[in-house]
Image (cartoon, rainbow, N blue to C red):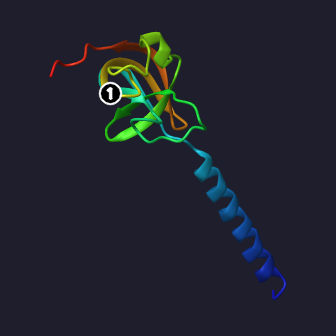
Amino acid sequence: MKRFLPLVAVSWFVLVAGCDSETKSIQSVVDLPLATVVDAACGRCMFALKDGKKCNLAIRTDGKSYFVDGFTMRQFGNPDIASGMCKKVHQATVTGQIANGRFAASTFELLPLAKN
């Protein structure tokens, strides 16, 4: 019995540790199947996201920012001009999926800037 008890304890520990590591690897996925209006800009310049030294398109929704896969800032004009995405936050209508900390865009339509 004295030998059996440590074996059970070690087996239980391995089982619990194994289950815990699997739980941590599960990522949440959020679908945006309907057109959703979000903030859009350069993730590095306007949303303080870190992704090397390059400027990349990003969105902000529900207070969280995500880099965008499937579209680039250059598709919407020069990001470095006064009204560009490195200088101003725009509004965009998007559909897609948030997974693994990134937004995989199916559609991305930039809305006109509000006149001040």
Residue at 32% x, 28% y: name it: 89
The residue indicated by pointer 1 is 88
Task: Tell me the quarter of the picture where residue 77 sits.
Answer: top left
Q: Nearer the viewer, residue 81 or 105?
A: 81
Q: Nearer the viewer, residue 21 or 43?
A: 43
Residue at 43% x, 22% y: name it: 80
Q: Nearer the viewer, residue 60 or 12?
A: 60
Residue at 38% x, 40% y: name it: 64
Residue at 37% x, 18% y: name it: 94
- Left or right: residue 55 versus residue 114 is right
Outermost left residue: 116
Residue 19: horizontal and vertical position, in percent?
A: 65, 56
- Left or right: residue 78 versus residue 23 is left
Query: From the image, which quarter does the N terminus lie in?
Result: bottom right
Identify the secondary structure beneath mark 1.
loop
Q: Amino acid at mark 1?
A: Lys
Relative to 76, say whether 13 is above or below.
below
Residue 66: horizontal and vertical position, in percent?
A: 46, 34
Residue 34 visible in the picture: no
Outermost bottom residue: 2
